[in-house]
Amino acid sequence: MDITPEELVEEVRRMARLAMIELNKEETKQIAEQFKSILDQLQTLRELDTSDINPFPLEDRDPTPWRSDEVVLWNRYNEVLSQAPASEDGYFKVPQIVRDDRNEE
Amino acid sequence: MKNSKFLKFSAFDLMSGYSKGEFIVSDVIETVLEYIEINERNLNALITPMYEEARSRAWMLDAALARGEDLGPLFGVPVVIKDNITTDGVRTTCGSRMLENWIPPFSAHVVRCLERAGAVVIGKANMDEFAMGSSTEYSAFGPTLNPWDLSKVPGGSSGGSAASVAAGYAPIALGSDTGGSIRQPAAFCGVYGLKPTYGLVSRYGLVAFASSLDQIGPFARDLKDLALVLQIISEPDDCDATCVIKERPNYLEFLNESSLEGFKVGYLSDYKLLEIDEEVKKAVTEALKICQDAGAEIIEVELPISARYGLPCYYTIAPAEASSSLARFDGVRYGFSVEAEDLQELYQKSRGGGFGPEVKRRILIGTFVLSSSGYETYYLQAQKARQLVVKEFDEVFLKADVLLLPATPTLPFKRGEKILDPVKVYMADLFTIPVNLAGLPGLSMKVSSSSSGLPVGIQLVSKKFCEGDILKTASIIERAVGPATTIMGGDRK
């Protein structure tokens, strides 16, 4: 793979943004160094002639079976909510997403 | 130690003792827990030993025993569960800081099956974080050591399960295998480890790593125990749509055969450029000789595509699936969470702080191969290569009934030796990974000991849903080499 070390670091930063993972400088540098040797190894797959191969044959061959549509009672919601860092009125609580701009005039 | 004989008993030995009234469940569980408490200081095979839960369950079972109730097929048998398999009310960490304090509100299907059969869960086993690793050194809870030699790794990712069974914590453990995570540690710890056919065992309650590859399977020191556990956990389940609804054979029956007449055992005649330890090659030759003496026809096979392209194929597909599976850890509903001003920052900081280095590395590789710049070149090409691996095995199984292969290319390696070079550590799964790619069953078992006293294992692979053929072959080999043994604190060199 023809890619400069600076481009690799930039690529790792881009992936970290896509994957929503905060990396510090040291981690970014370390992963960028390993990225190249890992991707070089993965590149050996290019030697294979795969022109006539269906990559996803299972989709046609084995359709997913359905289970019967039955109601199952389960009432341990409080236990589930208690695992969350924040909850309110039976809901998970997250930082505010939508702001009301009218009050900021 | 009083009653230390219990630590060497198989599940069948224990059940026979209970039914004859020779001892009760609490005797066994107390012995086991005392032993664990002493040995955990060295071994670190368990993330969460379940002292209180195991004691109260033992009392409950003893009360049932006293009332003369019907005993389940695993009545009073201690079992260890890998910590990526959920246990209702007992924390399930996946070896990660991300889930350090997560207490699941449900048990996995396999855990329910074992408990219905009367088993006593005594602890949650250490593992590489989210099952990504081959040495159990990537656990956020410290590494597990190999009970045969504390300077060596136990293998991974189910290293805690394998070490528990080898050390005598329990005759049975469960693990999960995505690229060799049951078979490689079983070989390194000198016990049996089976990865069943993809679709045989429900994964409901297994925290997903790579869903087209993951399977749950048993560890044991005795082949009969292994077959029994397979029978119990392979009960069909609606909650996993990939779990095949069809009748399972009686696996124990396959262990009674004394001959391999008319049976064809395939082996790799030429390892080409692969670097294989001489003692591993010797163990394969020895096991082939046993099969031949039992009447099997030994035939040469070749797996050139699996050997050269299995690793890169796996290390494309598994991280791609992991990047998707692990997207659920967002710091909102459960798991590690960092306070933040906005939602994006909450996700990024929680995931950045909760995941360890190997998990981050694989998620980022997976994100890359699925991104617009990597999808065609890497991901799609790997999916196609996977079909070539499947086809290669299909053709080999037209000629052979089972394959007898190395389980791992090397003997257990030193702790800290490979942790800095991910590509090197990936080589440990060279012979196990293609089996996952093709969805086949594979068993590893100890055949001999190395000159340095370490276990040396081999692997048996068969067609899909033909676990019986593997068990039949393994039982012939077991009769010649003896069952796996425990290595107890005092027995160690």
Image: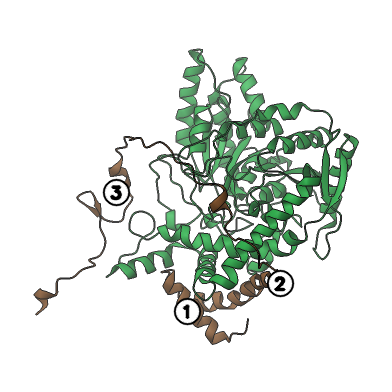
Residues at marks 3 and 2 on the same chain: yes
Q: Do the residues labelled 3 and 2 touch (CB within 8 Å)?
A: no
Mark 2 → mark 1, Cα distance in angstroms: 35 Å
| Residue sitting farthest toward the top | B68
Indicate the chain coloured green by its letter.
B
Q: Name the residue under label 2.
A: A47
Residue at the (43%, 72%) spot, across then down: A18
Say which residue label 1 marks.
A25
Residue of label 3: A81
Q: Earlier in the sequence, mark 3 or mark 2?
A: 2
Identify the secondary structure beneath mark 1.
helix
Q: Viewer-proximal residue, B470 or B286?
A: B470
Query: Which one is in front, B25 or B295?
Result: B295
Chain where mark 2 sits: A
The kind of residue tagged 1 is Lys
User: Would you say the residues marked 2 and 1 are in contact, meaning their CB atoms lie under 8 Å apart?
Assistant: no
Report the residue at 53% width, 25% height from top.
B26
> Disc 2 marks which amino acid?
Glu
The lab-note entry on whether marks 2 and 1 share a chain reads: yes
